[in-house]
Image (cartoon, helix red, strand yellow):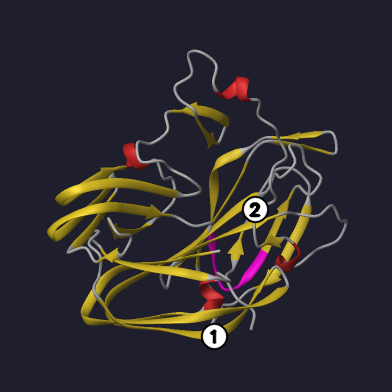
Amino acid sequence: MKILLLLLVSVCSFAGVRIQDTLYMPNGQRANGTMTISWPSFTVNSKEVAGNPSGTVYQIRNGVLNVELEPNDAALPTGTYYTVRFAWNTGGTSTQFWVVPTVAFTIPISAVRASHPSAPQFAVSVSQILPAGNVGDCMVRTLTGWFPRQCPGGGEVSGQFIKEIDSVISVSIPASEHGLTRDFYVQVYGEDGSPVEPEDIIFTETGVTVTFAVAQSGNIVLRSLPSEFQFNFTSQTSISIPAESHLIRSVMAVNCRETDGEVVQTGAINFTPAPISIGGVFGQSVDISISFAIPQSGSCVVFGE
């Protein structure tokens, strides 16, 4: 089944490649919501294309996609892509990465959608990372380039932050300490490496607080993954997140939170194998169904690769 959304757009001022399609939600209805397209500045075919890192928002109505974008398959710097973020009226968000080919005809969305953005090609000399006067020995990518930054205290590696704890009841980890820029979930391990179930976990805009029933020692691990999908819900005792909505091939974790940030205590969680198509490539994933003991409002984030 075709998936997704519609958008009406009078996009960029430059001539480019027209992307046209009719898109649907998993229930067969034409999608409604918003789409935000953002991109960095790049050079293609001797043209300088101005970047739009904050993105432009377009209304998605009634299933018709018709947008014109400058091709970026041969853009410099290598690895340039469009980031397309969708927010559905029915709840949930998703992100796609578009690489637009250099063609002289109209193409469907399957011709531009990539499962992962192309990796930029660059090299960084150690002398650039550790000269005197730099803030630290970690490099951070921002919208305008790579910059040195003090490494987090617990060590952030590939979307992971680890904090050692010693006989504590409650621990707060501010964003300024963990340094993770994507959504994340929390796992706790005792000194022997065995999993520990916290009494409570509360996420806020500035960090996360983990509380235990008795004093604990070991490690708190915050993990983010390359792919994530957020599904919002209001006053529900059960929710379903189809594979064709989250578009994550390998689901590794699901984290449900109430509107105040407190982790929701779920009932049954079921994963049912289901096919998906990303960029015209078919694969296997799972439909997700989750039940709650009482009506809940909040969001569930699906993590994976």
Res. 49 image quadrant: top right
Residue 116: give its label.
none
Residue at which label 1 appears? 273
* Camera-nearest label, 2 or 1: 1
Task: Tell me the residue at 79%/49% (across/down).
Answer: 73
Q: Tell me the magenta residue range.
A: 59-65
Residue at which label 2 appears? 10
Q: Is residue 120 visible?
A: yes
Task: Tell me the residue at 68%/47% (across/down).
Answer: 119
Name the one closer to the observer, 121 or 98: 121
In the rendered image, the quadrant that contains the C terminus is bottom right
Residue 113 in percent (x, y) is at 69, 62
Name the one closer to the observer, 61 or 44: 44
Residue 216 in percent (x, y) is at 18, 55
In the rendered image, the quadrant that contains the N terminus is bottom right
Magenta-drawn stretch contains 282: no
Crowdedness near tag 1: few (<14), some (14–19) or many (≥20) residues, C-alpha within 10 Å:
few
Magenta-drawn stretch contains 61: yes
Residue 62 in percent (x, y) is at 56, 73
Q: Is residue 25 visible?
A: no
Q: Secondary structure at mark 1?
A: strand
